[in-house]
Image: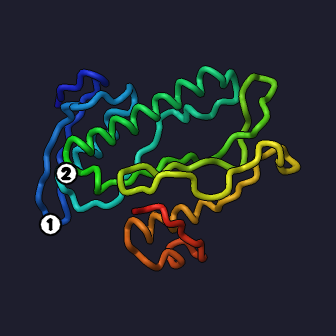
Amino acid sequence: MRAYAPYSRFKVGAALRSTSGAVHVGCNVENVAYPEGTCAEAGAIAAMIAADLPTRLYYTAYRRNAFDTHVQQGEQHQRLLTYVSDAVSGFMQDMERIGRADDVAVLVFSEFGRRAAENTSLGTDHGTANHMYVIGKPVKGGHFGKPPSLTELDTDGNVAHTTDFRRVYASLIEGWFGYQDSKALLSGEFAPMAMFS
Protein backbone atom coordinates (compact mmCIF):
# COMPACT_ATOMS: atom_id res chain seq x y z
CA MET A 1 0.00 0.00 0.00
CA ARG A 2 1.25 3.49 -0.80
CA ALA A 3 0.02 6.13 1.62
CA TYR A 4 0.40 9.85 1.11
CA ALA A 5 3.34 10.64 3.36
CA PRO A 6 4.97 13.91 2.26
CA TYR A 7 7.33 14.35 5.21
CA SER A 8 8.71 10.88 5.78
CA ARG A 9 8.12 9.15 2.44
CA PHE A 10 7.19 6.00 4.40
CA LYS A 11 4.66 3.56 3.00
CA VAL A 12 2.29 3.65 5.94
CA GLY A 13 -0.96 1.74 6.10
CA ALA A 14 -2.43 -0.56 8.69
CA ALA A 15 -5.25 -3.01 9.24
CA LEU A 16 -5.74 -4.09 12.85
CA ARG A 17 -8.10 -6.77 14.15
CA SER A 18 -9.31 -6.11 17.70
CA THR A 19 -10.06 -8.82 20.25
CA SER A 20 -13.76 -8.51 19.35
CA GLY A 21 -12.95 -9.35 15.72
CA ALA A 22 -13.59 -5.84 14.37
CA VAL A 23 -11.13 -4.67 11.72
CA HIS A 24 -9.81 -1.11 11.85
CA VAL A 25 -7.99 0.23 8.78
CA GLY A 26 -6.13 3.45 8.25
CA CYS A 27 -3.23 5.19 6.62
CA ASN A 28 -0.87 7.98 7.50
CA VAL A 29 -1.91 11.30 6.00
CA GLU A 30 0.45 13.33 8.20
CA ASN A 31 -1.57 16.25 9.46
CA VAL A 32 1.44 17.49 11.40
CA ALA A 33 5.09 17.44 10.41
CA TYR A 34 6.90 14.68 12.26
CA PRO A 35 10.68 14.67 11.80
CA GLU A 36 12.32 12.11 9.54
CA GLY A 37 12.59 8.65 11.03
CA THR A 38 9.89 9.02 13.68
CA CYS A 39 6.78 9.73 11.63
CA ALA A 40 5.62 6.18 11.07
CA GLU A 41 5.60 5.22 14.74
CA ALA A 42 4.20 8.41 16.30
CA GLY A 43 1.75 8.93 13.44
CA ALA A 44 0.52 5.33 13.69
CA ILE A 45 0.04 5.65 17.45
CA ALA A 46 -1.87 8.91 16.93
CA ALA A 47 -4.08 7.16 14.36
CA MET A 48 -4.81 4.28 16.76
CA ILE A 49 -5.72 6.75 19.52
CA ALA A 50 -7.96 8.65 17.08
CA ALA A 51 -9.66 5.34 16.19
CA ASP A 52 -10.49 4.80 19.89
CA LEU A 53 -8.72 1.45 20.06
CA PRO A 54 -8.97 0.04 23.61
CA THR A 55 -5.19 0.02 24.06
CA ARG A 56 -4.06 2.08 27.05
CA LEU A 57 -0.28 1.81 26.58
CA TYR A 58 1.77 2.26 23.41
CA TYR A 59 5.54 1.91 23.12
CA THR A 60 7.90 3.15 20.43
CA ALA A 61 11.68 3.44 20.30
CA TYR A 62 14.14 5.72 18.59
CA ARG A 63 15.80 3.77 15.78
CA ARG A 64 19.39 2.74 15.22
CA ASN A 65 20.60 3.27 18.81
CA ALA A 66 21.50 6.79 17.73
CA PHE A 67 22.05 8.15 21.23
CA ASP A 68 25.06 5.93 21.88
CA THR A 69 27.35 8.92 21.37
CA HIS A 70 30.83 7.73 22.32
CA VAL A 71 32.45 9.81 19.55
CA GLN A 72 32.01 13.47 18.48
CA GLN A 73 28.96 13.94 20.68
CA GLY A 74 28.50 17.72 20.64
CA GLU A 75 26.65 18.52 17.40
CA GLN A 76 25.25 15.00 17.00
CA HIS A 77 23.62 15.01 20.44
CA GLN A 78 22.09 18.44 19.87
CA ARG A 79 20.64 17.26 16.54
CA LEU A 80 19.23 14.06 18.07
CA LEU A 81 17.59 15.93 20.94
CA THR A 82 16.01 18.28 18.39
CA TYR A 83 14.57 15.29 16.50
CA VAL A 84 13.07 13.85 19.67
CA SER A 85 11.70 17.23 20.75
CA ASP A 86 10.12 17.76 17.34
CA ALA A 87 8.60 14.26 17.36
CA VAL A 88 7.05 14.72 20.82
CA SER A 89 5.80 18.18 19.84
CA GLY A 90 4.28 16.85 16.61
CA PHE A 91 2.60 14.00 18.49
CA MET A 92 1.15 16.35 21.10
CA GLN A 93 -0.09 18.66 18.31
CA ASP A 94 -1.79 15.63 16.77
CA MET A 95 -3.44 14.84 20.12
CA GLU A 96 -4.71 18.43 20.34
CA ARG A 97 -5.97 18.28 16.75
CA ILE A 98 -8.01 15.12 17.35
CA GLY A 99 -9.32 16.33 20.71
CA ARG A 100 -7.44 13.76 22.82
CA ALA A 101 -4.76 15.94 24.46
CA ASP A 102 -6.45 15.60 27.88
CA ASP A 103 -6.36 11.79 27.54
CA VAL A 104 -2.66 11.27 26.81
CA ALA A 105 0.54 11.28 28.88
CA VAL A 106 3.92 10.54 27.30
CA LEU A 107 6.91 9.06 29.14
CA VAL A 108 10.31 9.68 27.52
CA PHE A 109 13.27 7.72 28.87
CA SER A 110 16.55 6.12 27.86
CA GLU A 111 17.86 2.72 28.86
CA PHE A 112 21.12 4.17 30.15
CA GLY A 113 22.66 7.49 31.12
CA ARG A 114 25.93 9.08 30.08
CA ARG A 115 28.97 9.89 32.18
CA ALA A 116 29.50 13.50 33.19
CA ALA A 117 33.05 13.72 31.82
CA GLU A 118 33.96 13.76 28.14
CA ASN A 119 36.05 10.82 26.88
CA THR A 120 39.13 11.11 24.63
CA SER A 121 36.96 10.79 21.48
CA LEU A 122 34.92 13.92 22.28
CA GLY A 123 31.94 11.83 23.38
CA THR A 124 30.66 10.35 26.62
CA ASP A 125 30.58 6.76 27.80
CA HIS A 126 27.70 4.83 29.36
CA GLY A 127 26.70 6.07 32.79
CA THR A 128 24.36 5.01 35.56
CA ALA A 129 21.89 7.87 36.09
CA ASN A 130 19.53 9.40 33.56
CA HIS A 131 16.58 11.73 33.23
CA MET A 132 12.95 10.91 32.42
CA TYR A 133 10.23 13.22 31.11
CA VAL A 134 6.50 12.90 31.62
CA ILE A 135 4.67 15.12 29.12
CA GLY A 136 1.04 16.04 28.55
CA LYS A 137 -1.80 18.35 29.52
CA PRO A 138 -2.74 16.27 32.60
CA VAL A 139 0.84 16.45 33.96
CA LYS A 140 1.69 18.97 36.66
CA GLY A 141 4.66 20.94 35.38
CA GLY A 142 7.92 21.13 37.25
CA HIS A 143 10.80 19.00 38.45
CA PHE A 144 10.15 15.89 40.52
CA GLY A 145 12.88 14.37 42.66
CA LYS A 146 16.16 15.90 43.77
CA PRO A 147 18.36 17.31 40.98
CA PRO A 148 21.56 15.26 40.50
CA SER A 149 24.98 16.73 41.12
CA LEU A 150 27.56 16.97 38.33
CA THR A 151 30.35 17.38 40.88
CA GLU A 152 29.49 14.67 43.45
CA LEU A 153 30.14 11.64 41.24
CA ASP A 154 30.65 8.04 42.31
CA THR A 155 34.11 6.43 42.28
CA ASP A 156 33.72 5.46 38.59
CA GLY A 157 32.86 9.02 37.52
CA ASN A 158 29.13 8.36 37.18
CA VAL A 159 26.34 10.72 38.16
CA ALA A 160 24.58 9.30 41.22
CA HIS A 161 20.85 8.88 40.72
CA THR A 162 18.60 10.66 43.21
CA THR A 163 15.24 9.13 42.28
CA ASP A 164 14.62 5.46 41.55
CA PHE A 165 13.08 5.17 38.06
CA ARG A 166 10.49 2.79 39.52
CA ARG A 167 9.02 5.76 41.44
CA VAL A 168 8.22 7.31 38.06
CA TYR A 169 6.69 4.02 36.91
CA ALA A 170 4.65 3.84 40.16
CA SER A 171 3.48 7.42 39.56
CA LEU A 172 2.19 6.47 36.11
CA ILE A 173 0.73 3.13 37.18
CA GLU A 174 -1.21 4.64 40.09
CA GLY A 175 -1.67 8.29 39.12
CA TRP A 176 -2.38 7.84 35.42
CA PHE A 177 -3.63 4.29 34.88
CA GLY A 178 -5.45 4.22 38.23
CA TYR A 179 -4.10 0.79 39.23
CA GLN A 180 -3.39 1.13 42.96
CA ASP A 181 -1.19 -1.93 43.46
CA SER A 182 2.02 -0.80 41.77
CA LYS A 183 3.92 -2.82 44.40
CA ALA A 184 2.76 -6.07 42.76
CA LEU A 185 3.79 -4.91 39.27
CA LEU A 186 7.16 -3.48 40.33
CA SER A 187 8.08 -6.23 42.84
CA GLY A 188 8.63 -3.65 45.54
CA GLU A 189 7.23 -0.49 47.08
CA PHE A 190 8.16 2.75 45.34
CA ALA A 191 6.39 5.88 46.50
CA PRO A 192 4.53 7.57 43.63
CA MET A 193 4.97 11.29 43.03
CA ALA A 194 1.92 13.54 42.65
CA MET A 195 2.57 14.47 39.03
CA PHE A 196 -0.98 14.42 37.62
CA SER A 197 -3.58 17.14 38.08
| Image x and y of residue 20, in percent | 14, 66
| Image x and y of residue 74, in percent | 65, 23
Residue with the mark numbered 2: 16
Type of amino acid at the residue the image marks with label 2: Leu
Its colouring scheme is: rainbow
Tell me if 148 is positioned left or right of 38 in this view.
Answer: right
Type of amino acid at the residue the image marks with label 1: Ser
Are the residues at dot 2 and dot 1 in contact (C-beta closer than 8 Å)?
A: no
| Image x and y of residue 28, in percent | 21, 34
Measure how far apart labels 2 and 1 are at the Cα level: 11 Å
Question: In the orientation shown, which residue stands out farthest toward the right?
Answer: 155
> Residue at the spot x=53%, y=69% of the render?
192
Image quadrant where one finds the C terminus: bottom left
Number of numbered discs overlaid on the protein picture: 2
Residue with the mark numbered 1: 20
Tell me if 140 is positioned left or right of 42 in this view.
Answer: right
- Kindly indicate the quadrant of the structure image that contains residue 8: top left
Residue 33 drawn above or below residue 161: above
Tell me if 22 is positioned left or right of 162 in this view.
Answer: left
Q: Does dot 2 land on a helix, a strand or a loop?
A: strand
> Residue at the spot x=74%, y=40% of the render?
115
Judge the density around disc 1: few (<14), some (14-19), many (≥20) Cα neighbours within 10 Å. Answer: few
Q: Nearer the viewer, residue 179 or 61?
A: 179
| Image x and y of residue 135, in percent | 43, 49
> Residue at the spot x=57%, y=52% of the render?
143
Tell me the tag on residue 110.
none
- Kindly indicate the quadrant of the structure image that contains residue 126: top right
Residue 117 drawn above or below residue 9: below
Q: Does dot 1 land on a helix, a strand or a loop?
A: loop
Q: Nearer the viewer, residue 92 or 179?
A: 92
> Residue at the spot x=53%, y=24% of the render?
79
Judge the density around disc 2: few (<14), some (14-19), many (≥20) Cα neighbours within 10 Å. Answer: few
